[in-house]
Image (cartoon, rainbow, N blue to C red):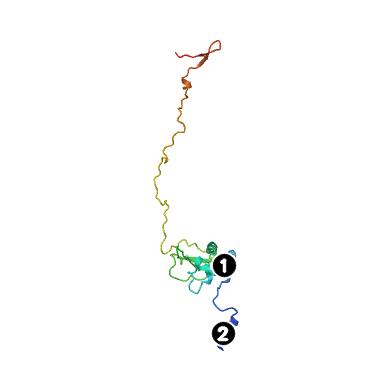
């Protein structure tokens, strides 16, 4: 009888046994979902597949996780993830850090589960149903638990006072010729005059 009831239960359920991914119609019918690329839709399924009742906020999109499920390109994953974040379908709760700390995400059509390890501000800026309002709030207030490294804007070798003189010394003039013509200054030469016969004569100074 027990086996008969189990068989009847399988028939009545209308689907195969096991867990399933539940997408509300409000998600699939939304304008934001309709505008997603095919890789972004596929990635959303991968994110939703990880949800098991109380881990919304610890879902992964890392290459290490997705490569085991057939994903080959880190660039495709990155572009799809940015689409989902921009459209408000997922929310980042932990910012990954190299070499081996992955980012965590939450689906926005589910309540955020209260889990240890979220970055500062992650829970506060989570918006339930963000895909309906044109995208999630940007995680501008998130701070990794290890803190934010301050990046110096100065060159790595420090800031030196620039020398006003070129390294090869002052530029020398191209030509060292005297500005005075070799035959003398024309202002110092006697001027030519014409006598009554039309011949040139040299003027003499008095």
Nearest the camera: 188 or 171?
A: 171
Badge 1 density bin: few <14, some 14–19, many ≥20, Cα 10 Å? few
Nearest the camera: 175 or 33?
A: 175
Which residue lies under the disc numbered 2? 6
Which x, y percent locates residue 136? 51, 64
Give yes or no for contact between labels 2 and 1 (Cβ–Cβ under 8 Å). Answer: no
Q: Which mark is residue 100?
A: none
Residue 107 visible to an observer of this rendering: no
* Quadrant occupied by the C terminus: top left
Which x, y percent locates residue 98? 45, 62
Give the residue drawn at x 53%, y 71%: 49
Badge 2 density bin: few <14, some 14–19, many ≥20, Cα 10 Å? few
Q: Quadrant of residue 196?
A: top right
SS class of the residue under badge 2?
helix
Picture mark count: 2
Which x, y percent locates residue 112? 48, 70
188 on left or right of 17 = left
99 on left or right of 70 = left
Give the residue drawn at x 52%, y 14%: 193
**Residue lying farthest to the bottom in this orientation:** 1
User: In the picture shown, does residue 119 fall above or below 179?
Assistant: below
User: In the picture shown, does residue 34 fall above or below 4?
Assistant: above
Which x, y percent locates residue 60? 50, 68
**Mark 2 or 1, nearer chain start:** 2
Q: Residues under labels 2 and 1: Cα distance?
A: 34 Å
User: In the picture shown, does residue 77 fall above or below 151?
Assistant: below
SS class of the residue under badge 1?
helix
* Quadrant occupied by the N terminus: bottom right
User: In the picture shown, does residue 13 fall above or below 203?
Assistant: below
Residue 5 visible to an observer of this rendering: yes
Q: Which mark is residue 42?
A: 1
């Amino acid at each position: 009888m027990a086996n008969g009831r189990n068989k009847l239960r399988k028939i009545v359920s209308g689907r195969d046994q096991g867990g399933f991914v539940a997408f509300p119609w409000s998600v699939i019918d939304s304008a934001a979902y309709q505008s997603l690329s095919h890789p972004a839709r596929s990635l959303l399924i991968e994110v939703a597949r990880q949800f098991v009742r109380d881990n919304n906020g610890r879902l992964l999109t890392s290459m290490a996780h997705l490569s085991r499920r057939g994903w080959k390109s880190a660039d495709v994953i990155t572009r799809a993830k940015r689409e989902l974040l921009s459209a408000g379908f997922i929310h980042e709760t932990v910012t990954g850090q190299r070499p081996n700390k992955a980012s965590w995400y939450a689906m926005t059509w589910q309540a955020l589960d209260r889990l240890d390890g979220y970055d500062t501000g992650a829970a506060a800026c989570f918006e339930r149903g963000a895909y309906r309002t044109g995208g999630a709030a940007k995680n501008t207030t998130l701070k990794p638990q290890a803190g934010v490294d301050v990046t110096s804007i100065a060159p790595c070798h420090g800031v030196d006072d620039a020398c006003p003189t070129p390294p090869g010394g002052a530029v020398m003039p191209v030509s060292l010729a005297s500005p005075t013509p070799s035959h003398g200054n024309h202002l110092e030469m006697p001027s030519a005059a014409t006598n009554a016969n039309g011949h040139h004569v040299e003027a003499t100074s008095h």
